[in-house]
Image (spheres, helix red, strand yellow):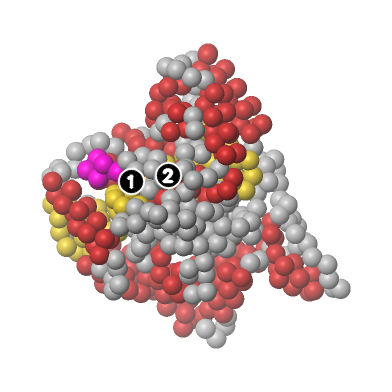
Amino acid sequence: MSALTSLTLKAALDGLKAKSFSAVELTQAHIDAVEAARPLNAFLLETPVKALEMAVLSDARYATGTAGPLDGAPLGIKDLFATQGVRTTAASKILDPFVPPYESTVTSQLWRDGAVMLGKLNLDEFAMGSSNETSAFGPVINPWRKGGSNQALTPGGSSGGSAAAVAADLCLGATATDTGGSIRQPAAFTGTVGIKPTYGRCSRWGVVAFASSLDQAGPIAKTVEDAAILLTSMAGHDPKDSTSLNVEVPDFAAFVGNSVKGLRIGVPKEYRVDGMPPEIEKLWADGVAWLKEAGCEIVEVSLPHTKYALPAYYIVAPAEASSNLARYDGMRYGRRAQGGNLTEVYENTRAEGFGDEVKRRILIGTYVLSAGYYDAYYLKAQKVRRKIADDFDRAWERCDALLTPTAPSAAFGLGENTNDPIAMYLNDVFTVTTNLAGLPSMSVPAGLDANGLPLGLQIIGRALDEGTVFSVAGALEKAAGFRSKADKWW
């Protein structure tokens, strides 16, 4: 493996500015790494020719002193973001083949700042899943393995390709999306950093929709600083997205390394769940001790409606999914199956095109939105959502940020939970609350379990206060000193 691929995004950008190497050299090193790592199944589509063309333009801008903040940085793009002229599938048969004639706002801003596209990354189909096993193109395999075992592990989901590619040094960073934990849980499973920003911070325009009131784009990166650099480019107001927030985008990297002395950090008592591994309890206690040592005040807070978050989420998200996915009917784009009449074409297209998990969520969503059950399920779930947001509002009266585990376990084996949807859904137990409340939250790798697998801690902040989240994350990253990498087996 080239030493160039082991660089952080910040180090690579510094090297390009210093002319220690060229954007073409950096990009070629990553193209070679992507090709060598095909057993991971992280990329659904590689775009080496496009990447090198973009790198040549970056070198030209460096030569003339007009380089952008991300010029020459090779990135992976989750295949949920529309990329102009490049196939976009959402890891579903129903969208294959679809080549968008437009570019998502988030990716257009990355290209505006000079980033280089290595290709499109694998994910759970339509971002519905916690293990990357619902992809129509097969699961991503986590670069990490248990000590002394060859068992294939999940990288988490839905952004499994993004997390695996960053963890395996195939790209300097990746775009991802988070509807109920799909950035943070994969980051925790792969020893990477992932942030879900405040709802509306990044435009959803050009991102294939799952649940429109919950979906939010964000980066997965190698370090807290790298995540901050990427988010600064990805964020910003977009008039094409009615939920986009018209607020200024700060330089998030400026918050990393700031002192956290005097900050009040809340520890929610409801996040201690039955059956949680003692290693995660210990890691959480370590995180508390590290922040206390850094000068933070630790306060216990209560988020009493947390226990209703998963049930509420798994009503709201499928309801919105059933509405959003109604557009895939074989008429306008993507797959079209044969049928004797219009109704048969609809039925056959959707039966062939959607996988089991997507069908399950569409059926749940259609059920809870139906005339006889709308009040009993959907309306009640929305009321619970309001209560969860109120819990956080009360917590902010006592603290500046919250510290919790990211996931209730380390990475598990592929196939372990596929026959038990409830066990799979429980992966989101610590993450869905912030999607329901629209708050920024971030996973930082903080240690290894007994099998040598990474574990993450989650920082939750006030709406639009990513700055504090980055400052606390930076302090945790420094204290934890997490430097472990997966041993290369691919």
| Viewer-closest of 196 and 29 | 29
Q: Which residue type carries mark 1? A: Glu
Mark pair 1, 2: CA separation = 33 Å
Magenta residues? 477-482
SS class, disc 1: helix
- Residue 34 visible: yes
What is the chief secondary structure element of the magenta stretch? helix
- Residue 463 visible: no
- Residue drawn at x 70%, y 43% is 101
* Residue reaching furthest to the top: 64
- Residue drawn at x 22%, y 52% is 287
Quadrant of res 31 = top right
Q: Which residue type carries mark 2? A: Asp
| Viewer-closest of 14 and 329 | 14
Q: Mark 1 points at which residue?
A: 466
Dot in front, 1 or 2: 2
* Residue reaching furthest to the right: 340
Give coordinates of residue 179: x percent, y percent. Answer: 47, 59
Quadrant of res 340 = bottom right
Residue 76, relative to residue 28: is it above or below?
below
Q: Mark 2 points at which residue?
A: 487
Q: Magenta stretch: residue 103 in it?
A: no
SS class, disc 2: loop
Instruction: Give the side of residue 121 with respect to residue 405, left or right.
Output: right
Q: Magenta stretch: residue 480 in it?
A: yes
* Residue reaching furthest to the bottom: 372
Residue 457 numbered mark, or none: none
- Residue drawn at x 46%, y 62% is 413
- Residue drawn at x 51%, y 17% is 62
The number of callouts visible is 2
Residue 417, relative to residue 119: is it above or below?
below
Determine crowd level at label 1: few under 14, some 14-19, many 20+ residues with C-alpha closer than 10 A.
many
